[in-house]
Image: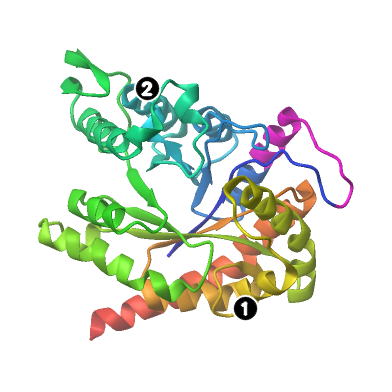
Amino acid sequence: MELGITTFGEVTPDPNTNRTISPGERLRNLIEEIALADQVGLEVFGVGEHHRPDFAVSAPAVVLAAAAERTKTIRLASAVTVLSSDDPVRVYQDFATLDLLSGGRAEIMAGRGSFTESFPLFGNDLNDYDTLFSEKLALLLKIRESERVTWSGPHRPPIDNRGVYPRAVQEPLPVWIAVGGTPASAVRAGTLGLPMTIAIIGGMPERFTSFVDMYRDAGRRAGHDPSKLKLAINSHGYVGENSKEAADEYYRPYVGMMNKIGRERGWGGFDRAQYEALRSPRGALHVGSPQELIDKILFEHELFANDRFLLHVSVGTLPHEKVMRAIELFGTRVAPIVRQETATRAAKAAVR
């Protein structure tokens, strides 16, 4: 199994000091975090796109291009690209450029976006939320398949046999579909034969098993090789030296951010009891000691037979040195054991 990190690059007050670092400092810290993830052998680092003051990254490809010069092997992904409010031509060009700079390590993780600030910012109507994504995904896939493109659709001016450059090193440039929990999204990813990332950030992971079955069933019905239907699980989390230390360090940043978003969306408040329930052995939150993360990742692998696990660090602002230590622990103490165990399971399954 591949293991990696995702982040949104929070720019929020540190709950312990009430200090908010500048976006510039946060971005410089982020490049160091990506470089460390590469050094400790993690396979993927994903950076999200947002257009609001509490996140520093609005242009993931730019950040990842800077990271490409500091890294050697780690794959560099958006997490996510809000495709519904972007131009697929420009998205392809940005990530093809990243692919060239990184020697073939770029990936697009395309999603509709759980935040909606980008829609009015770029002149899109939220009433077209679903159709925008469908149309722009179809155009992005057409661009990656062909150097010259002819296209027409209701949400974009037509393209008449125009070339899109530069072309990526990878053929095709990887495009993952990122989904939350909408069955239609899983069916679409499977029908198109695209790899899928599920964000599991609440409740019990077991409730997503039927969702994964829909994805794989749709892929088989569409005639895609089941081995090509790659699946990633993405969950909030943090790893510390021991369970109590990790739980205590992560609690205030995590709950502070979740309650902030909750107030915006009309959710109820989040407290320590709910937090502890989420980080229990069958909860969605991956916070604890290295062994606790190993156990939870392997439990989910039994459920989903996923090809990737991505740990989202952090939710809310943690000190940079704490994030760096969490990445180090994840790469050196969690990832090797998870890889070994999942490889053993795969070998046993092949024999049967």
Name the residue rendered at 26%, 38% in the picture.
134
311 and 54: which is toward the camera: 54
* 256 left or right of 343 in image: right
How far apart are the two marked residues, 1 and 2, measured between alpha carbons? 42 Å
* 199 left or right of 248 in image: left
Magenta part of the chain: 16-32
Identified by mark 2, the residue type is Arg
Kindly state the secondary structure of the residue where label 1 is placed. loop
Q: Which mark is residue 90?
A: 2
Q: Is residue 348 above or below residue 29?
A: below
Q: Which residue is mark 1?
A: 280
Place of residue 70 in the rendered image (x, y in percent of width and height, measured from the top left): 60, 36
Q: Is residue 22 magenta?
A: yes
Q: Is residue 3 above or below residue 292?
A: above
241 and 284: which is toward the camera: 284
Place of residue 84 in the rendered image (x, y in percent of width and height, measured from the top left): 37, 33
Name the residue rendered at 31%, 66% in the picture.
212
Place of residue 224 in the rendered image (x, y in percent of width and height, measured from the top left): 15, 56
